């Protein structure tokens, strides 16, 4: 059997993952990653770091496995938090959890595990791994978890073949209810702990307060774009269809003020502080240069929905490189633009200028920086940040 280092987070999923690995006869070491301790912007009682560590230690003691705490806060700050601030400053909407998995859990943490003689690292993600041999070479596939409501494959959409080679996902075939029931029967301290939400290792935050550590508050206008606005007609080319409409001040009316355009994201509804409208207001676009936020009423606003998104070739990552497209190729896929979004029917196409995802139905709140991930059947083939 193998030596496996489990990332014990203090939650029920990683706890059960550790138990299953030990039952399979593996030599299991539990490690808690201390990646963040600051509390600026953190909503009260969310993600208490010391409590997470203590729960992880209790689980290790109950399972009778060795336990350590490692400090990866410097790596996390440099790889994830700096990226988050830089993206928001550009008016993009990043997903730090995707970067956390690529740069921390399956990179920096793997180096920690390998230094301790590990063959694998294991996590409590609801996803699966399969191996196939193609022309004498082993290829690793990342599959969605069997619990469709908890599938976390999207968060791993940037991992590579080398990282998958050394990764194990023990609970990927289980339902969440099964995991909790097993933890309860085992008497694990984490059996009834609530799932954590928010930024990986940071927790649920008040985003403007968190970003205000580095991004200066600047008063700017909120412009409402009317629902009946006449938008310019576009050519049917993919490149034209993928462009968002260029919004300007003279297209609408000032309806309020904000403290910084980069504190908002396309599709956002809450936090605008503007009432009295017939339909809910959504953010249609932000302009960090002019420091303006554009809003419009209703889900069906013509500036809120897009059917085609563009991804730069150099940003496209194939989890399974054997399925990569050549220029001129296309394939039908299921795709999502955010975690928990139901998979959408789409066509992925590669052209000389880059990749396009064309959805069967328009997608609401597409914003630059968010990751598009595409699947065939249960396999996540690749991903890229949306670009424009």
Image (tube, grey):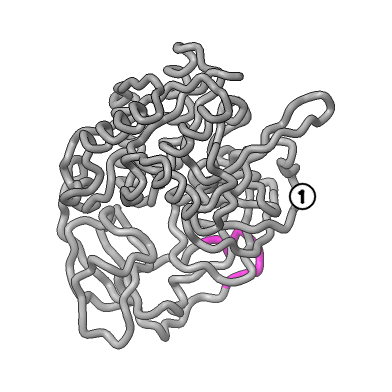
Q: Which residues are magenta?
A: 234-243
Left/right of residue 138 with respect to residue 66 in the rendered view:
right
Q: Toward which corner of the image does residue 85 lie, by quadrant?
A: top left
Q: Which residue is mark 1?
A: 329
**Location of residue 187 with respect to 244 vertically, above or below:** above
Q: Secondary structure at mark 1?
A: loop
Return the residue nearer the eye: 270 or 66.
66
Residue pictured at 30% horizontal, 54% vertical: 288
Q: Is residue 239 magenta?
A: yes
Return the residue nearer the eye: 15 or 161.
15
Residue pictured at 82% horizontal, 24% vertical: 136
Q: Position of residue 324 (x, y in %)?
A: 71, 41
Prevailing SS of the magenta stretch: loop
**Location of residue 78 with respect to 40 vertically, above or below:** above
Quadrant (top left, top right, bottom left, bottom right) of the N terminus: top right
**Location of residue 138 with respect to 226 vertically, above or below:** above
Q: Is residue 382 magenta?
A: no
Left/right of residue 72 with respect to residue 118 in the rendered view:
left
**Location of residue 119 with respect to 193 vertically, above or below:** above
Residue pictured at 43% horizontal, 24% vertical: 109
Q: Position of residue 254 (x, y in %)?
A: 22, 75
**Crowd class of label 1 (few under 14; some 14 to 19; many from 20; radius 10 Å):** few
Residue pictured at 48% horizontal, 36% vertical: 17
Q: Position of residue 294 (x, y in %)?
A: 32, 68
Q: Is residue 318 visible?
A: no
Q: Position of residue 7 (x, y in %)?
A: 41, 30
Q: Is residue 172 visible?
A: yes
Return the residue nearer the eye: 227 or 36.
36
Return the residue nearer the eye: 293 or 359.
359
Residue extending farthest right = 135
């Amino acid at each position: 059997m193998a030596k496996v280092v489990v990332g014990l987070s203090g939650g029920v999923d990683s706890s059960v993952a550790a138990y299953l690995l030990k039952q399979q006869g593996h030599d299991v070491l539990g490690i808690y990653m201390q990646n963040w301790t600051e509390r600026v912007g953190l909503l009260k009682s969310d993600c208490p770091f010391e409590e997470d560590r203590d729960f992880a230690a209790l689980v290790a003691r109950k399972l009778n496995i060795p336990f350590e705490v490692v400090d990866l806060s410097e790596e996390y700050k440099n790889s994830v938090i700096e990226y988050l601030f830089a993206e928001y400053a550009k008016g993009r909407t990043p997903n730090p959890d995707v970067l956390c998995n690529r740069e921390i859990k399956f990179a920096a943490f793997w180096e920690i595990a390998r230094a301790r003689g590990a063959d694998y690292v294991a996590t409590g993600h609801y996803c699966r791994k399969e191996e196939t041999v193609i022309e004498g070479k082993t290829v690793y596939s990342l599959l969605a978890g069997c619990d469709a409501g908890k599938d976390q494959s999207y968060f791993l959409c940037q991992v590579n073949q080398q990282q998958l080679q050394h990764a194990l996902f023990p609970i990927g075939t289980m339902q969440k209810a099964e995991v909790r029931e097993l933890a309860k029967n085992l008497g694990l301290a984490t059996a009834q702990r609530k799932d954590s939400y928010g930024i990986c290792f940071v927790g649920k935050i008040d985003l403007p307060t968190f970003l205000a550590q580095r991004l200066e508050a600047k008063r700017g206008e909120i412009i409402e774009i009317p629902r009946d606005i006449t938008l310019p007609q576009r050519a049917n080319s993919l490149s034209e269809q993928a462009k968002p409409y260029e919004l300007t001040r003279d297209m609408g009316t000032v309806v309020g003020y904000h403290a910084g355009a980069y504190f908002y994201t396309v599709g956002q509804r809450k936090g605008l502080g503007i009432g009295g409208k017939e339909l809910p207001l959504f953010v249609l676009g932000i302009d960090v240069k002019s420091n303006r936020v554009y809003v419009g009423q209703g889900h069906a606003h013509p500036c809120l929905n897009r059917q085609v998104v563009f991804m730069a070739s150099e940003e496209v990552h194939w989890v399974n490189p054997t399925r990569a497209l050549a220029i001129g190729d296309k394939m039908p896929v299921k795709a999502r633009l955010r975690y928990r979004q139901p998979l959408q029917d789409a066509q992925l196409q590669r052209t000389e200028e880059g990749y396009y995802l064309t959805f069967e139905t328009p997608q609401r709140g597409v914003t630059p920086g968010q990751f598009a991930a595409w699947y065939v059947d249960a396999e996540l083939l690749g991903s890229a940040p949306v670009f424009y």
